[in-house]
Structures are given as C-alpha cells and as structure tokens.
Amino acid sequence: MESPPQIRFEDGASYETFMGVWSRLAGEQFLQWLAPPAGWRWADVGCGNGAFTELLFARCAPAEVRGIDPSPQQLAFARERLAHAAAHFVEGDAMALPWPDASFDAATTALVIFFVPDPARCVAELARVVRPGGSVSTYAWDIVGGGFPLAMLQEEIATVLGKPPLWPPSVDAARIEVLRSLWSDAGLVDVDTTAFTVERTYRSFDEWWAIAQTGPRLASFFASMGPAQHAELRERLRARLAVDANGAVTTSARANAVRGRVPGASR
C-alpha cells in the first residue's frame, strides 16, 4: 500500500498567510486563558515560523523564549522575524527536547500536538524541561470535531474526489478528553481544559480560495484534480461560503486547549 504523503510546512512565508494568522487569532485567546506572569522563560515546541513566539513577546513579556522545530526553512523565517528579541531557535524533535531538566518556567505547543507521532512522549518531554510548579500547555484545532479552519474545503474535496482528507498522524490527540488524559498521565497536576472559537475575515472569496490552496495537507489533492474537478470544487465552495455586502468572506475555527502544572513548589 502506498504511504500517504507527509504533512510538512517548509515555507515560512507561505505558512504565515495560510496558518500563521489563524495561529495568532487562537493564540490570543489561549494566552488570555493561561494568564501567565511576565518574566517567564518559555519553551515554544513546534515553533514553526515564529508566529506564536512573536505573540509570546507581544503579550507575556518573557525573559526568554527558546523555540524548536524540525523545519530549517521555518526556523530561518522565525529567526528573521524575531531578530531583535530574546528568542533562540534550534532544529529538533518535539519528542526528544535538547534542553536539561527544569530549564523553563513554561513549555507550550501551538497547533502542534496532532502532528507529533507519539503525543504522550512529547508531553512527557514538555513536563521534563519545566521546573516544579511551572506550566505545561497546548492548543490545537479540534479537527475530529470539524474545528479545522478549512474543514469545509476538506468536506468538499471528499465529495468531489471520493477520498478522505489527509489527517495529521495523531489527529485524536486534539480532542478535549484525550488532551486531559495526556496531561494527567504525564503526572501534571491542576489539569484544566477549555475550547474557543475564532473568526478570520478574507477580503473576497478569491483571496480565501488562493490561500486555501497553499496548505501542504491539501496540496496532493489539488495536484490530482483535473480542470473540471477543480472548477467543480471551486463553485461548490463559493456556494457554501457567505459573502457580505462588501464581498468579504468570514470563516471560523475551533480549538481545544489544556494546561497543567509540574508537581512541586514553585521557585
């Protein structure tokens, strides 16, 4: 059986338009919920092009942020966008973090947990690198529950091509009950979960359509379409998306989040 194509984000600029905007919209609500104090040292695991890292500096006044991601192209973008901040980036694996135990006040992942082949191992690593009393958290699209920003597009691709969408390898990990179990099983305490909905407005359907086609998760499906299928998909989506009086299109997405604390006294 042919292996499904891997979902990889290799272009920081393209990711910024496709998902970076969404990441910050959800990240704003996530950080309001976390309400962390200023001056913390953060690990941003799966930092990508630095969209959420930048938000940490804008909203949390961290002493330092260290990011890690497997894509050198994404990291290059992150280093450029945060060149004047106390941010440090390294290429690496979320399941084998390169930092010593108790190195940070907080470790988080933004829209990452469902991409990790072994989420439990990732959470254990997050907990390992955070000091006693420190925070471990994540937020992720509720893909199984239809919360992905392009869920409508996935549905229509399935109809036009008769194929299910390409899911991340650990799509179930973003479910609220699974997140709670992952955090509790890692020995974290005071575990709490929440969900929130965010909206993004595009200037027109054409802008939405152009951006939607840049997602690596969907690229293989677009490449396999003939002109007639491509046109059919476009028109099906145009019919489903509401356009306001100015021609703008607003879509929504839903994310699940979890937070917990490493056992022990805070220092």
Image (cartoon, rainbow, N blue to C red):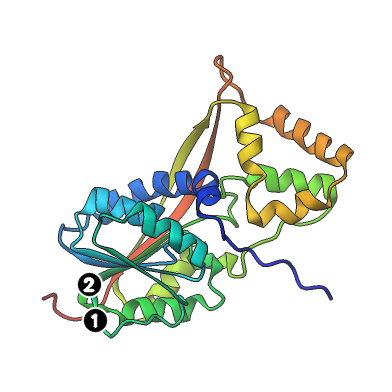
Residue hosting label 2: 134
- Image quarter where the C terminus lies is bottom left
The image shows residue 263 at horizontal and vertical percentages of 23, 80
Query: Which element is circle 2 on?
Result: strand
Res. 194 visible in picture: no
Q: Is residue 75 above or below residue 99?
A: above
Counting the numbered discs, the total is: 2
CB atoms at circles 1 and 2 under 8 Å apart?
A: yes
Amino acid carrying mark 1 in the image: Ala
**Viewer-proximal residue, 157 or 264?**
157
Left or right: residue 237 compared with residue 175: right
Amino acid carrying mark 2 in the image: Gly
Query: Which element is circle 1 on?
Result: loop
Q: Earlier in the sequence, mark 1 or mark 2?
A: 1
Residue hosting label 1: 102
Q: Outermost residue toward the bottom?
A: 100
